[in-house]
Image (spheres, rainbow, N blue to C red):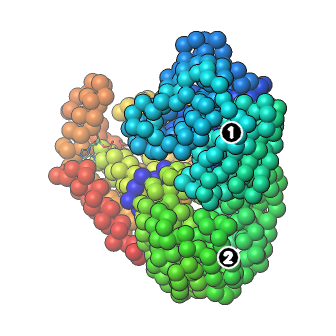
Amino acid sequence: MYKIPFLDLPPLQAAAGTVRLPGSKSISNRVLLLAGLAEGETLIQDLLASDDTAVMLEALRQLGCDVRQDGPVLRVRGIGAQLNDGVRAAGLKLFLGNAGTAMRPLAAALALLAATQGATFELSGVPRMHERPIGDLVDALRELGCEITCLGQEGFPPLRLGGPTPLTLNAPVRVRGDVSSQFLTALLLALPLVSAEDVVIEVVGELISKPYIHITLELLKRFGIEVRRDGWERFTIPAGSRYRSPGEVHVEGDASSASYFVALGALAGIEAPVRIEGVGTASLQGDVRFVEAAALMGATVSQGPNWVEVRRGAWPLKALDLDCNHIPDAAMTLAVMALYADGPSTLRNIASWRVKETDRIAAMATELQKLGATVEEGPDWLRVNPLHDWKPASIHTYDDHRVAMCFSLAALNPLVTDRPVRVRIEDPACVAKTFPDYFETLFEVVRARRADIPVITIDGPTASGKGTLADEVAHALGYIVLDSGALYRTAGLAAFHAGVSLDDGPAVAQIAATLDLHFRKGRAILQGEDITDLLREEATGLMASQVAAHPEVRQALHQLQLDFRRLPGLVADGRDMGTAVFPDAPLKVFLTASAQTRAERRYKQLIDKGISANMESLRSDLEARDARDKGRAASPLKPAQDAQLLDNSGQTIEESKALVLEWWQSRQPF
Ligand SMILES: Nc1ncnc2c1ncn2[C@@H]1O[C@H](COP(=O)(O)OP(=O)(O)O)[C@@H](O)[C@H]1O
Ligand SMILES: Nc1ccn([C@H]2C[C@H](O)[C@@H](COP(=O)(O)OP(=O)(O)O)O2)c(=O)n1
């Protein structure tokens, strides 16, 4: 996740590849509970990993379910609706954090199990959970005969569920549906436990969030329970219903999150489609119907049960006039797609946008206008005109994940303009609400022209602080880091280990060209061996300086370094980043500090790492290395003509970082 104040997106040219969506939370916890109550083993694919699902899993384990992670699959062997002797005798205390999707259905299921099989359960959560009402569900369960005590305030968790106690199942169970649909979901999921006769649920008040009840009913069906539904007021669980594991269940991806990648395919899936795994024709979520809207705009869509492939069809996109009431969340994506259409597009019946994370109609209108678009808005509609004359814009995201995600599509502007612009997304970490790795996922499937991917180079002599500064600046901007010295160090080390003379340029170059080097979690792995610490030794630095003098070695490492220029940008440190490897970098820094300062820094660095060091020899080694790096014929150490010189002898790391970021910002159009 990019936990930074802003993320700059370079102009993007195309998209292709496969995206796996994070799983839907509500489906994940429903499936877990059903698998936990069912007979037999359920293999669950693509379960969402989140706090709420962890809580449910722990509860199932305590209930006696056998839960095992088997590679990407979670195996749950359910209790077959039977409490084991241990649980019946000792009862259970379950802590459910702040997971409403665990508290409500577990309260219902365990209340019924306690009543029929005799056990005591206590369900509690974090303080906030104890402020979230559950009274409507408790009332419905008490009406049935369940013994429930609210241990704190009446109508709120923590709850004690007791039994055995007789249940009255021949009269309809009445539950309110106008506050939360979760109470109805809880009863629907739990009542098959006691359905010796038909069990009827009647909803009091107008049921809200019907699509969520649809999800519940569909999942029940997959577990063998066919609920009869009369409108949205009356539900009957047929006599003899039993949870039966369907064997394998795929948890769908989040359908609203899919919309950004559907749009990406429609806009930029030019040579190959964008494939989205995790949603498809078998999806339960209402927002999957976004693909129909994308198709109306011209997208070419093909689908399977849990995948969608989208590529560009009509181009420009076809303007759209659509009632979006059925896809309120995903429809925000259409507002940005409309910039690429052949006429004005109107999104109607979107009044609910005004009361979401932010007033989304106002937010979309304001931010689209920043890009130069002409936009009109009404109380429940938005009209967006296509855009040809794009302006670079810094998009405010209003702590709204969807604003952040849909405006990333504005970076595809080179598809419709000869004068592409960059787009800045403010507070990109707001995507954590539903899709923490959204931007990382996006960068895997989009392409930019290499020249459009920004590079900041930081060159300078040893121990001037290049590596430190490069890491800091890259971290602030969300960019990738290239420590080019590490490549020369590795080449020197590999040659040394192979017994090759470091003076033999062609022989070292051959080794450099075929380095089996990987960087994993901040560690450098050469031929399977972790060489991270070895790389930083002064002796290795001297070897690097020696092999770096050979033009053949430099040539051998050239392409490897260019390959680090990836989205969203690069900070490269070394000796010739600005002069030879990335001569087109928009910002080049030449970092120096006095020899004495540098020797002192290196000394401290080594001592801190527990490596013994001698100031005098450090300083003379450092001067020798400077002389060789400056004096060699091939890419000698020198500032690029257009480099910003920075002597940081008297500066803190923070000060140098702030200055470089200021130089960078002064080159931005925002
Ligand atoms: N103003 C400064 N800028 C960068 N590094 C500094 C500064 N002051 C002290 N240092 C320290 O200098 C040491 C050498 O920095 P390093 O980044 O390894 O240098 P280089 O990559 O140029 O060899 C590090 O321990 C770093 O914390
Ligand atoms: N782009 C580069 C990077 C490093 N080198 C050579 C010259 C340096 O003395 C060695 C080691 O570089 P490195 O940046 O790791 O060394 P310091 O951390 O500055 O001591 O590699 C180079 O020639 N060109």
For the point 52% across and 30% down, the residue is: 148
State the image coordinates of residue 25 (x, y, percent, origin top left).
60, 45
The residue lying toward the viewer, choosing from 192 and 245, is 192
For the point 42% across and 69% down, the residue is: 396
Q: Height in image: 143 above or below 400? A: above
Quarter of the view holding residue 198: top right
Q: How many C-alpha atoms fall within 10 Å of the one at disc 1: few (<14), some, or many (≥20)? A: many
The residues bearing labels 1 and 2 have C-alpha atoms spaced at a distance of 33 Å
Q: What secondary structure is marked by label 1?
A: helix
- Badges 1 and 2: C-beta atoms under 8 Å apart? no
Type of amino acid under label 2: Asp
State the image coordinates of residue 250 (x, y, percent, origin top left).
74, 42
Q: Which residue is disc 2 drawn over?
A: 323
Tag of residue 484: none
Q: Is residue 132 visible?
A: yes
Q: Is mark 2 within 8 Å of ligand 1?
A: no
State the image coordinates of residue 618 (x, y, percent, origin top left).
26, 34
Quarter of the view holding residue 327: bottom right
The residue lying toward the viewer, choosing from 361 and 1, is 361
Q: What secondary structure is marked by label 2?
A: strand
Q: Is residue 619 left or right of residue 224?
A: left
Q: Earlier in the sequence, mark 1 or mark 2?
A: 1
Q: Residue furthest left?
A: 650
Type of amino acid under label 1: Leu
Q: Which residue is disc 1 drawn over?
A: 189
State the image coordinates of residue 607 (x, y, percent, origin top left).
26, 28
For the point 58% across and 84% down, the residue is: 383
Instruction: Name the quadrant where ligand 1 sits.
Output: top left
